[in-house]
Image (cartoon, rainbow, N blue to C red):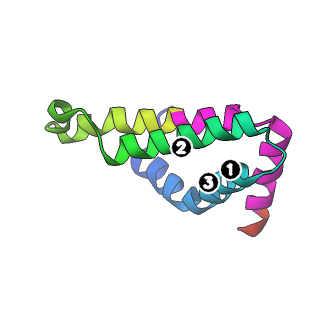
Amino acid sequence: MMRDPRYVLARVIWYLPRFARVFWGIMRDPRIPPGRRTLQWCLLVFGIGYFLFPIDVVTDLLVPFGWVDDIVVLYLCLWGIVRLCPRQIVAEHVARAARRG
């Protein structure tokens, strides 16, 4: 069953502050080994940089399609940040963000 894209977008926007708190907490957690933390920061900088300054000039002319790869790269970078973090730490940050609202 497909959901209405407007509903999905509204939910993403609604939970965006919570997502930001989870990622900010993960990025600052001292229990993550330094090597992984460095890789997480590199992924974050690359993902945001690619999203803000895309290199693909040709596909950006087709506005709705040009943003798809930017969003996919940003998503994959954020996914990588979470995958580099132990599950228990991620669960703690998700629970903490849910309690704060």
- Is residue 65 toward the left or the right of residue 72 in the image? left
Task: Give the quadrant of residue 38.
Answer: top right
Between the residue at mark 3 and the residue at mark 1, the CA separation in whole angstroms equals: 12 Å
Asked if the residues shown at circle 1 and circle 2 are in contact, with their CB atoms under 8 angstroms apart, the answer is yes
Asked whether 85 or 6 is in front, the reply is 85
Between the residue at mark 3 and the residue at mark 2, the CA separation in whole angstroms equals: 14 Å
The mark that comes first in sequence, 3 or 2, is 3
- Label drawn at residue 44: 2
Residue of label 1: 27
Secondary structure of residue under mark 3: helix
Asked whether 21 or 55 is in front, the reply is 55
Asked whether 84 or 64 is in front, the reply is 84
- Is residue 50 toward the left or the right of residue 46 in the image? left
Q: Amino acid at mark 2?
A: Leu
The quadrant in which the C terminus is found is bottom right
Residue occupying image coordinates x 60% and y 57%? 20
22, above or below 50, in the image: below
- Label drawn at residue 19: 3
Count of labels shown? 3
Residue occupying image coordinates x 75% and y 68%? 100
The mark that comes first in sequence, 3 or 1, is 3
Question: In the rendered structure, which segment of residues is drawn in magenta?
Answer: 77-98
- Label drawn at residue 39: none
Q: Amino acid at mark 1?
A: Met
The mark that comes first in sequence, 1 or 2, is 1
Q: Amino acid at mark 3?
A: Phe
- The percent position of residue 2, horizontal first and vertical second, equals 47, 34
Asked whether 49 or 88 is in front, the reply is 49
- The percent position of residue 8, horizontal first and vertical second, equals 48, 47
Secondary structure of residue under mark 1: helix
